Structure formats: structure tokens, C-alpha cells
Amino acid sequence: MTTKKVEMIFSPNAPHFVGNGFRVHNFIPSISCLSMQRMNPFILMDYNSKFFFEPSVEPRGVGVHPHRGFETVTIAYKGKIEHRDNSGGGGVIGEGDVQWMTAGSGVLHKEFHEKEWSKKGGEFQMVQLWVNLPSKEKKNPSKYQSIQNNDIPRFYLENNSGEIEVIAGKYNGTAGVAQTHTPLHLYNAKLKRNAEVTFNFPENYNTALLVIEGDIHINNAEQASNDHFVLMANKGREFAIKAHADSIILVLSGEPIHEPIVAQGPFVMNSRQEIIQAYEDFRSGKFGAL
Ligand code: MN
């Protein structure tokens, strides 16, 4: 079995605010070598590293905005996020929960810190991933998968050394809970100090790690600590992680969608014409109202 090596390790870039509630490092696609195509089908990753928000009566967040043509996957590590959409849907993403939203043909929503959490303030940490949809599914109706932490299937490591939460795809026979439109794997590897674990992904998949918490070695060679992004080479299949502290690693690996990507603002389509159409539809009220 050939080893899959580390291609590059990225430090978090300078954070920016999305609205006034999400202080994020954008790993995909703003860091060089991490283009939408390089990590396809994962076309965007915003990471709110641990950040303390002062109490606020008015919840911080981002106001009404549209999406079309892809899925947003929001993973809350600390704090709570509340969302509302134009179809009357809404809910709270609590600590450890995942929201998998298919924007499809179009959704209008807003994302804020949860009201009660906001009043108390506290440490906030989350990831938002954008997962592309194949052209034939970009016009599907929008849909939510609200995944509570205790509904996420787990693979338990030997000697009580940790667990792999399988959000999507499969790990060692444990199947994830999220339905996806193309083949991909998404896990939270929760490792105790000294835990060792191996992963195995096809060479044509794009694979990366985000160290949410802790400190790890990959293949007994490279070291990565919290808030670092590890891009894995395509070549080779298997790699090993050893935790040097209690660690949480977001593991992502997916088969690229071999289609053109044209992205602008909140829309991700296949052509310039479809982007113009999306803006036209948004302006003329075809996304509805909120
Ligand atoms: Mn959004």
C-alpha cells in the first residue's frame, strides 16, 4: 500500500468578518494552491477559529442573503448558530451538530448566533464548507439535513483512544448520516493523546485535514497543530495520524466533479450566463422573501 504524503501545510491567514458574527480564516479558495478545483468538490472553507464574543443582546451574524448551485455544510464546535430561511425553515446548530443545507435552485437565509447564547457570549468556533453540486442537480429544490451530534454514527478506536464521527461517507464500515450528491467522506476524528489512526482514500479524491484542536504528526513525519490546514497529495492511498495532545481533526476527502466552476458571491454555477441569471432571479424576487 503506497503512502499518501502531505503536500503542504497552511497556517491560518488573516481573519475577516462575515457579517459581524463570523470571524473566519478562508482556506479554500483564497490561499494559493487551494483553489476550488484543487479541493473540488469542496469549493470553499471558512474557519472561525476559537474566538471570544462578548455578550450581546442583539445576536451577531449575517443578514438575509441567497445561495444557488451548491451545498453549505456548517459544523459547530463551540457556540450555537441559528438560521432562518424563506421557506419558513429554521433551527439551531448546537455544539457538535452539523447542518447540511442544499441550496439547489435557490434559498434565501440568514445566519446568526443563537439568541440566548448571544446574551451570555462565549467562545465560538465553527466551520462552513461549500460542497459543489453536479450540474444536473444545481436546480434541485432546496433541502436541509439537520444532524444532531448524537445522531452521527461513530467508529470507536481501540483501547478507548478516541472515535471517528462519520458525518458523511464511510469509515471502516461505519456509514455516515448525511446524504450526499457525489461520493465524499467527512469525519471529525476525536483523538485522545497518543491515539493512532489510519485513513485510506482513493488517489482521484481530493483530501485534506483541518486541525480544530490539538497537535498531530502525519505519517510520523510532518507536524500540524491547531488551526492548520493539511493538504494531502493525490498520489498514494493510506496515511497515519498520531495525536500528541487530545485532538479534533476535520477530515475531508471527495471525488472531484469534472465540470467548469464559475463562482461569484453566493452563487456557484457552471457558466457566466448562469451566474448572470442567478443575479437576475435574485433581483426580480424569484428567490422569495424573508
Ligand atoms: Mn449562507
Image: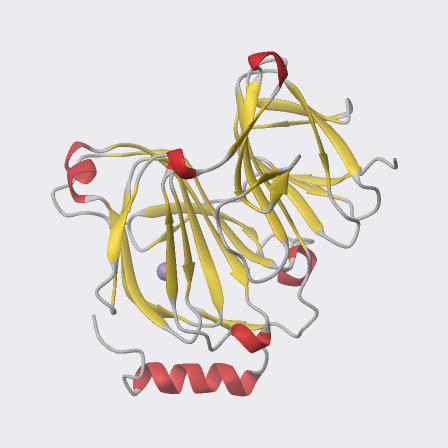
Quarter assignment of residue 13: top right
User: Which residue does the image show at 67% across and 62% down from the upper left?
Assistant: 37
From the viewer's side, name the closer residue of 65 and 102: 102
Q: Is residue 174 above or below residue 197?
A: below
User: For ligand 1, which image quadrant applies?
Assistant: bottom left
Q: Is residue 103 above or below residue 20?
A: below
- Quadrant position of the C terminus in the picture: bottom left
From the viewer's side, name the closer residue of 111 and 205: 205
Residue 246, how many percent across, how many down? 53, 18
Q: Is residue 191 above or below residue 73?
A: above
Residue 161, how many percent across, how many down? 58, 15
Residue 143, how many percent across, how many down? 38, 64
User: Which residue does the image show at 57% across and 56% down from the upper left?
Assistant: 30
User: Which residue does the image show at 72% across and 52% down from the upper left?
Assistant: 205
Residue 214 visible in the picture:
no
> With 2 as the anchor, is 114 left or right in this view?
left
- Quadrant position of the N terminus in the picture: top right
From the viewer's side, name the closer residue of 162 and 210: 162
